[in-house]
Amino acid sequence: MTKKRNIVIIGAGHNGLICAAYLAKAGHEVTVLEARDQIGGGIAPREFSKGFTAPGLAHLAYPLHPKIISDLEIGNNARSKSRTINTISLSKSGDHLHLGQSSASGGSLSSEDQEAYSAFKKEFLAYAKALSPLMMNKPPRLKNMDTKDKITLAKLGWKVRFGLKTDSMREFLRVGGINIYDVLNEVFDSEALKGAIAADAVIGHHMAPRTPTTVLTYILRLFGETENRQLTSAVPNICEALATAATSAGVNIRTQSKVEDILLSDDQVTGVRLSNVEEISADIVVSNSDAKSTFLDLVGVQDLDAMFVHRISKSRTNGDVAKLHFALKSLPNFTSLDAESLRHRLLIAPNMRYIEQAFNPSKYGEFSERPVLEITFPTIDNPALSPDGQHTMSVNASFAPYALKAGWDKKRKTFTQKVIDTVAGYAPGFESLILDHELLTPVDIESEYNIKGGHWHHGEIAIDQSFMMRPIHGTAQYNTPISGLFLCGAAAHPGGSINGLPGRNAAQRILAMTKSGDV
């Protein structure tokens, strides 16, 4: 029987809670320490103005992976009561493009493009499904593989070779590492359709359609649609459902408990020290924080190999998306769009050239003059988030670089006005509806959510920072160079989203290592 361990998990985001629940169900004593006054991390709601509440960082999500829902016996408690979300790519002319999971209409689409879209989604969803063995397990090492690594590679090879038809396999191998710009130009004629798809490939990343590996980021996004999942507004009760699953399994969750240091003795974890100097002993510490915070701040460079520190320091973790919340007197009047349509996700990315031009300034430390916007109105399905008759509007704005050359203190109002003006181009009179607003730049996200660089995914999901290279070579299988220290958050494989797989996979790795006596 596996020896019971005292385990501390740093951070009560969804991955931390999932990892905690798995470990507690296996019989370990688990404590989750959360620095903020509420659980949930980036998916927790926040009141940004009196009476107005909005999703913190995530306003859209695919549901948790069904395996997690089943394993943790969460059932319907983790499912959103809000309806399925489609995408409406806005046009100033009012000829908006409507995108569902497998169909497209409007936007003056030709019948050829409509058929091509259905075939394209089916093909790329098959690619995402083929990656399932890799997504659901620790990433295999490419040398000195253990049995689990070999099994994962064998399953992946089988899925790619036999799960895809021969032509699909060849196309998958051809496009997997290239840019989405070239692929979309091969398939579609509609500039609006290409722009909407390309936006999904790059939102949340320091990338544009012509950037290499944007096909990969699009496929990884589509993994959220496997297992018949559909995009919904950010799951409103997922935090509570996960907390209930964790506490029912015996997890102790403590908020307002900021970890200042991970304590070591002879390169072995012994516990953590909180900001109030309280020390908590632990056999195992699991960090739901990003890799830079974990190693450079909580562990400290003095206890790490110089080359390892260099790799962590050089990993690309600067965010490029700002979050804006608007308190509105009433819903905006978008040209040729009825109120029912505002339940869906609105996108301002009219074509791939627009996205490229929005991205270009960020390469030089400047924000977009005409940003790419993703807009939702969470109060339509949940009126309790605002006073009667009024509404909350949630916006993701790209591109807004963390390292803004002029500094965000000087440019906050200017960027906010750029976003307002961009929305007003599609909804005349929008600015007159604004009662209050909040801007969270990547710098604000860093300070408020304890994420170095303020990156959604705790680091770019490019080919050199994915799979067996995430977050860096040498700590890609959840365990780290420090004995007893593990990663379970978005910095770990398979990266940021709300599917919960980093937390679940990390727990499986910890349980396997405790059973074998390796930790």
Image: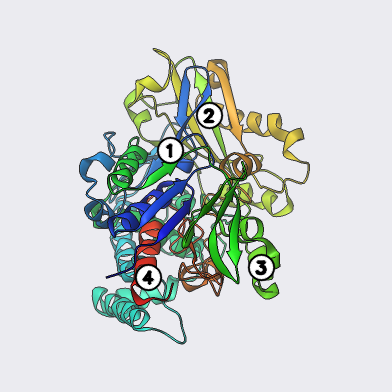
Q: In the rendered image, which residue does mark 2 sit on? A: 325
Res 514 label: 4
Q: Amino acid at mark 4?
A: Thr
Which is nearer the N-term, disc 3 or disc 2?
3
CA–CA distance in space, label 4 to label 2: 44 Å
Res 59 label: 1
Tag in front: 4 or 1? 4
Which quadrant of the view contains residue 239? top left
Identity of the residue furthest to the bottom in this view: 144
Which is nearer the N-term, disc 3 or disc 1?
1
Q: Is residue 330 above or below residue 443?
A: above
| Element assignment for label 2 | strand
Which is nearer the N-term, disc 4 or disc 2?
2
Residue depicted at x 31% and y 69%? 2
Which quadrant of the view contains residue 209? bottom right
Quadrant of the image containing the N terminus: bottom left
Q: In the rendered image, which residue does mark 3 sit on? A: 303
Residue 213, horizontal then vertical, whole percent:
51, 66
Residue 488, horizontal then vertical, whole percent:
45, 59
Q: Amino acid at mark 3?
A: Asp
- Between 165 and 403, the one lying in front of the other is 403
Q: Amino acid at mark 2?
A: His
The way the protein has been coloured in the rendering is: rainbow
